[in-house]
Amino acid sequence: MAATANIGQFFNTFNSKIEAPVRSHLKNVYVYLTMSVLSATAGAYLHVVNMVNGNFGLLGALASMGLVMGLHFTPDNGKNRGQRTAMLLGFAFLSGLGLGPLINMAVHVNPSLVSTALMATTLIFACFSLAALFAPDGHYLYLGGTLLSGLSMLFWLSLLNIFFQSPALFQLHLWAGLLIFCGFVVYDTQAIIEKRRRGDKDAIRHSLDLFIDFIQLFRKILILLMQKEGRKDNKKNNRR
């Protein structure tokens, strides 16, 4: 009974805080986000089971960039929704292919790491999304400049580490990236709400922002879990 009352109170608070058109828009955004995650899963699966061979590094990056640019430069006119959905899912599929090598490594370390990383990513994403939804309107929008500066810092850290190959720099990049993309989840969620209130109904493009956040969180969490598993294996070997 208490759980039912809490759930009822949750929805009452949500409905009273966010107006119906915005709620409907968020529903569409999360539907497209779910479709994107499933498409990325299909891409990663095809890579892992060796149904797709070859290195798609540069080619995949160019194709992904083309699809993202296509989404941004093809406004939603109500008639091109199928085309734009295909662009979104195509980008997600290529993102999954790009994750394939990392997932393959994780499977060889411990197959359960992938599902653990996916569950942890989903939980973290949900928690930060709820924090954004129930925070005061626009409360996290001030983070935009800080988060963009953080992305710039990540770029320079990765560039420096090409030359120094420092484990410390790699760890800094990993943990800073995790924090930054947690911040992007709350920022992007509140930005989507504000955009819809100003008349922007492009749920496909809005879901793209959240999908990128989700994929980046998954990547970093999976690497951290692999590192943790590696430390466990090293301890076992040392005891022997």
Image (cartoon, helix red, strand yellow):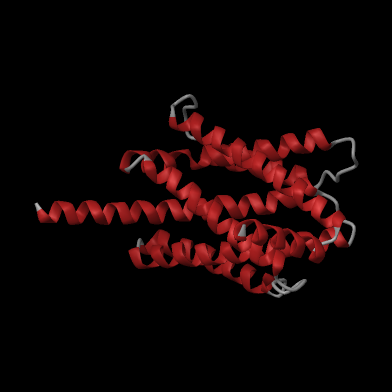
Residue furthest to the top: 51
Q: How many marks?
A: 0
Residue 46 in the image: above or below residue 135: above
Instruction: Using residue 125 as the reference point, say whether residue 206 is left or right of it.
Output: right
Question: Which quarter of the image is occupied by the N terminus?
Answer: bottom right
Residue lying furthest left in this view?
A: 240
Residue 132 occupies which quadrant of the picture? Answer: bottom right
Report x, y in % for residue 2. 61, 61
Residue appearing at x 62%, y 51% in the figure: 212
What residue lies at 33% left-to-right and 55% top-to-bottom? 227
* 113 left or right, relative to 55: left
Q: Nearer the viewer, residue 227 or 12?
A: 12
Q: Nearer the viewer, residue 132 or 20?
A: 20
**Residue 80, percent across and down?**
85, 36
Q: Look at the image and tell me whether residue 72 can be seen.
A: no
Q: Percent x, y for residue 76?
A: 86, 44
